[in-house]
Image (spheres, rainbow, N blue to C red):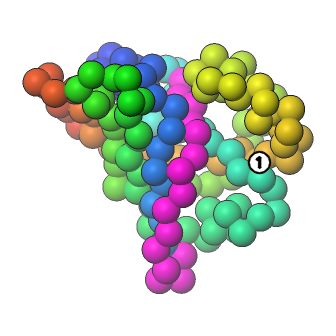
Amino acid sequence: MNISLLKNVTRTTNKMALSFSTDGQANVKIVNFVWFENKPDTLFFSSVKGTAGTREYTQAQSVAFTSIPNSDMIGNPYIRSQNVTIHPSNTTMKELLPKYLDSVPNYQKVWDMIGPKLEVFELKLGDVYVDPGLGKEKITLKF
């Protein structure tokens, strides 16, 4: 599977609008995420342990997302999926921290403020639509 377009687009963004429903109630949250080439079907994000958000994530029945293009990116490259599952991860924030520091501006401030309180979640993608920008070929990857 050629994941080069996915790799290119994930380099240009670090935020997503994560949409989910719990008990028939729709909700959407903006979260930072990280992606690794060796796990192309997985996005990682975190939330503060014990909050309403973490409870909602563990109970979500339907999950979708779209990445949010950085405002300085020409053509608005993004990824999105409606075929997503969400669950707590065995990966720790300490393991993800180097990637967060590399891809999310000013993340050190977030880590210094709430790092030990963060819990990691995984989004498992059944497929992902990759739009590398205006005028470029778009693809859907199936995992």
Residue drawn 46% across the image and 74% down it: 26
Main SS of the magenta part reads: strand
Instruction: Specify whether residue 133 is in view.
Output: yes
Residue drawn 46% across the image and 51% down it: 17
Residue drawn 14% across the image and 22% down it: 136
User: Which is nearer the eye, 56 or 141?
Assistant: 56
Residue ID for mark 1: 119
From the top left corner, tell me how far across and down residue 109 is, in percent: 78, 30
Corner quadrant of residue 52: bottom right
Quarter holding the C terminus? top left
Badge count: 1
Corner quadrant of residue 103: top right
Answer left or right for 68 relative to 122.
Answer: left
Tell me where the magenta segment starts and ends, as one range: 22-36
User: Which is nearer the eye, 120 or 117?
Assistant: 117
Quarter holding the N terminus? top left
Residue 25 on the magenta segment: yes
Q: In the figure, 74 relative to 20: above or below?
A: above
Q: In the figure, 83 relative to 21: above or below?
A: above
Residue kind at label 1, given as amino acid type = Glu
User: Which is nearer the eye, 47 or 70?
Assistant: 70
Answer left or right for 138 relative to 58.
Answer: left
Instruction: Specify whether residue 3 is in view.
Output: no
From the top left corner, tell me how far across and down residue 110 is, in percent: 76, 36
Answer left or right for 108 relative to 78.
Answer: right
